[in-house]
Amino acid sequence: MQFTSFYFILVFLPVTLLLYHGIGSRNRSAARLLLLAASFLFCGLSDLWSLFILLAQILVGVFFSVHILRAGSRSARARHLLILAVTLQIAALAYFKYMGFLVGSIGILLNRDMVWQNLILPIGISYTTFTQIAFLADCYRGTIREAVSPVTYALYLAFFPRLVQGPITAGTDLLTELSGDSGGRVTAEGLADGLVLFVLGLSKKIFLADLFGRPVDFAFHSIPFLSTLDILIVILSYSFQIYFDFSGYSDMAIGIARMFGYTLPVNFNSPYRADSITDFWRRWHMSLTGFLREYIYFPLGGSRKGPARTCLNILIVYLLSGLWHGANWTFLLWGLLHGLLQVTERICGGILPRIPRVIRQITTFLWASILWLLFRSPSIGDFRMMLDQLLVDGNWTIRPEFGEMIRVPGVRTILSVLGIDHVDALSSLLSIGLYLAAALLLCLQPRNNESAPYRKTGRLLLAVTALAVLCFLNTNEVSAFLYTSF
């Protein structure tokens, strides 16, 4: 079940909210049970197999957390239990997500035709696995000192606003809210803020992410016929598609959680304003970056063991980041290149501050965008073909299909009024240019939706209502969120 479906928006979410508020005003424990049941229902309606896997993960997490806490913080027995628990979690993730990639790669090395029938990837397993590893590691470290009730832990892992695409809830903030009285209170302010965030996120998905996704999908089915200009448009379009797709989902997830009185971590901080790749990763998918830093980079030694070891640790972390995103050599190379760029920035740390910040920002955006093309490519060969055409082709014509997919209403009329011959290529280029410029301005906005203060006025209510109606009129054509497959 998608956040964008009519069933979720018009039935599941409002009914769950009403029941939760009605029960929560009398019995908080019963309200949490209802929320847990709703989360299981959300998962089961999406995919029954995923619900069985989620239940198994919960049982494993409860079992190992109890025994790690009993063994004592940082004791040898606790360490052995943690290693076993993490091994089981990673093995399950690898079986569902990477077995086909591994078998195929072995077949290539042995020059044999080896095929593995990939299983259906359980919903949210990449996020729940990392969340569970963080929780068990905190039990071992002593950050979590007392056993959490099975119901609280199950809700922590299965909470439906963050189940499918995160944010990764490493740390204890959400856990504290779920187990205490500080969270879970439905308020008028929380409902209003959550509704605004939900509608804004939905509009990002429908009117921006899916719009830019059309030329991208078309291009990857027509690579040999693309010009230099076409590929430039595809690079920028995918940069904005993936940003608004994932940012929109995160807005919606945080908004839903606020409606129920809970707080999810912010995942974005204007990443396209970053002035280095290192800064980009402080701003992009912040919950994943935080997990990698806290539970992989620091345990490897961080920057405490000399420059060479620091660079190696960075490369390991971003190779794992690439692998986490998917089972393909393109993801591994994408992660490695991000790691190499950060190592280069560390080596050149004394030179970069002398370069004007706006130049560093433009360079960072271009690097990130080119690497997004690799991220999107089905194979490294496709990526190389597109780069060759970008750098060598020299053809600056535009595919007429792009103009049909991204068109500003009335652009031909405007050109006529200005006395400009409104040929299809010019009107298409102008339309696409206007959309790209508008998307860039939105990405460069000084404050993200999650942290913006919303004054509860009639004008805001009218604007949000109008935007919601426009979204509902277009939900039939909404595609699946990109990060669902990761």
Image (cartoon, rainbow, N blue to C red):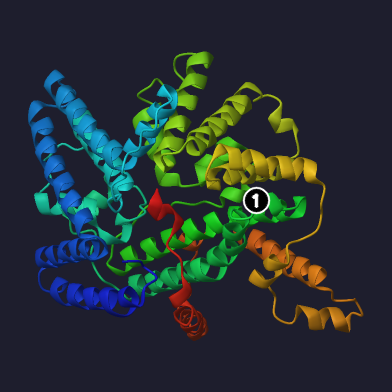
Percent position of residue 55, x then y = 15, 51
Between residue 101 and residue 187, name the one nearer to us.
101
SS at mark 1 in the image: helix
Residue at image position (40%, 22%) is: 110
Specify whether 424 is left or right of 19.
right
Residue 429, compared with residue 178, is above or below; it is below
Q: Going 27% across and 38% down the picture, which residue do you hit? A: 95
In-image side of 424 versus 260 (left or right): right
Q: Quadrant of the N terminus?
A: bottom left
**Residue 101 position by quadrant:** top left
User: Residue at (80%, 68%) from the top-left corner?
Assistant: 425
Does any portion of residue 446 appear in the rendered image?
no
Tell me if residue 427 can be seen.
Answer: yes
Q: Position of residue 152 (x, y in %)?
A: 15, 53
Name the residue rendered at 19%, 49% in the picture: 53
Picture layout, residue 215 above or below residue 266? below
Which of 260/478 is in front?
478
Mark 1 burial class by Cα count in 10 Å: few <14, some 14-19, many 20+: some
Residue 58: percent from the left, percent from the top?
A: 15, 47
**Where is residue 122 drawn, in percent x and y?**
27, 51
The kind of residue on which mark 1 rests is Ile
Q: In this figure, which residue is indicated by the disc labeled 1?
A: 223
